[in-house]
Amino acid sequence: LHLYTLIITLFLQLSTGFGLSQFKPEMKVVGGYQALPGQFPYQVSLRMATSYGSTRGHFCGGTIINERHIVTAAHCLYRKNPEDMYIVAGTVQLSESGQQRRVQSYSYHNLYSDGSFKYDVGIIRLYTALEIDNQTVKDIPIELSTPLAGTMCTVSGWGQTQENKSSITNLLMAVDVPIADWSSCVRNYSKLGDVVPEAGMLCAGFPSGG
C-alpha cells in the first residue's frame, strides 16, 4: 500500500499492496518491471557522498520539478548535511554516472515530525541547474487535481523487488497500481496499528497485494 502526500510523484521506493507483511515503505518496488532509458526522465537518485558500495551511496529517490529543484520525502532529508548529498539524473542504473549535481540546501514541511508519514515532503535546491534535454532529464508535469479511486498511477524507484529480500536493485524499477478508495485504505491500515491514514494522504495498491 502506498502513502502519498499531496502530489503523486514517483520519488519514493514504496511497498505495494494491502498485504500486512513487514512494512518498510522506503525500500520496495515489489512486483514491478524494469524501466527503460528515458521512460521516467524526472526520476533522480539521492546519494551520500560519503557512502560507496554497489548502490553508489543511493538512499532515496527524488523527482525533478524544475532544473534547480527536486521534490522528495522529508524523512530522506531529516538531519542530513546538505554538503554530504548529491543527486544523479538521466540514468536508470545506479552504476551509471548520469548528470551529477551537489545539493545546496533543502527544506521540508514545517509540520513534519520524524517517524511520521504526515507532511512527509521536502524540496532540494541544487547548486547548479540540470541540463533539461526532455529525453533522459525532464521536469515532471504537475497534476493539481486529486485522482479518483481506480485511477492507475505509476511508482518508480530503486528498491527491493521481492518480499524478504534485502538487496537494492541496480536498475530503476516501476509498478502500476490503482488509487484505492479511502474506506479501503483506512480499513486495511487499521490492521497495522502504527500507521494511520490522515487527510492530505492518498493510498494506492491492489487489495490482494502488488
Image (tube, rainbow, N blue to C red):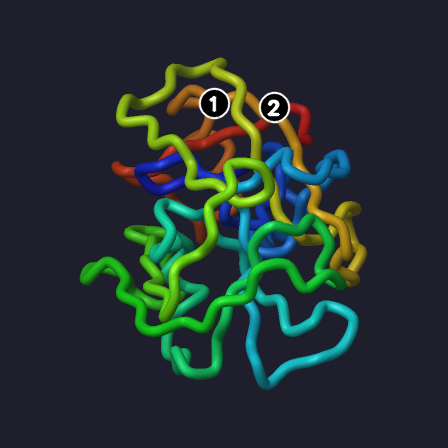
Q: Is residue 75 above or below residue 132?
A: below
Asked whether, in this view, residue 98 is left or right of residue 84, the answer is right
Residue 10 x, y percent position in the rendering:
51, 41
Residue 69 x, y percent position in the rendering:
34, 55
Residue 108 x, y percent position in the rendering:
28, 62
Spatial separation of the CA atoms under disc 2 and disc 1 = 8 Å
Q: Disc 2 designates what residue?
A: 207
Q: Which comes sooner in the sequence, label 2 or label 1?
A: 1
Residue at 64% from the left image edge and 73% from the top image edge: 57
SS assignment at label 2: loop
| Residue 190 appears anywhere in the view | no
- Please tell me which residue lies in front, 152 or 104: 104
Residue at 69% from the left image edge and 72% from the top image edge: 56
| Residue 52 appears anywhere in the view | yes
Residue furthest to the bottom: 50
- Please tell me which residue lies in front, 188 or 106: 106
Marks 2 and 1 close (CB-CB < 8 Å): yes
Asked whether, in this view, residue 132 is left or right of residue 208, the answer is left
SS assignment at label 1: loop
Q: Disc 1 designates what residue?
A: 180
Q: Is residue 49 above or below residue 142?
A: below
> What label does residue 18 carry, if any?
none
Asked whether, in this view, residue 199 is left or right of residue 79, the answer is left
- Please tell me which residue lies in front, 116 or 143: 143
- Please tell me which residue lies in front, 42 or 203: 42
Q: Locate the C terminus and report the quarter of the image it occupies.
A: top right
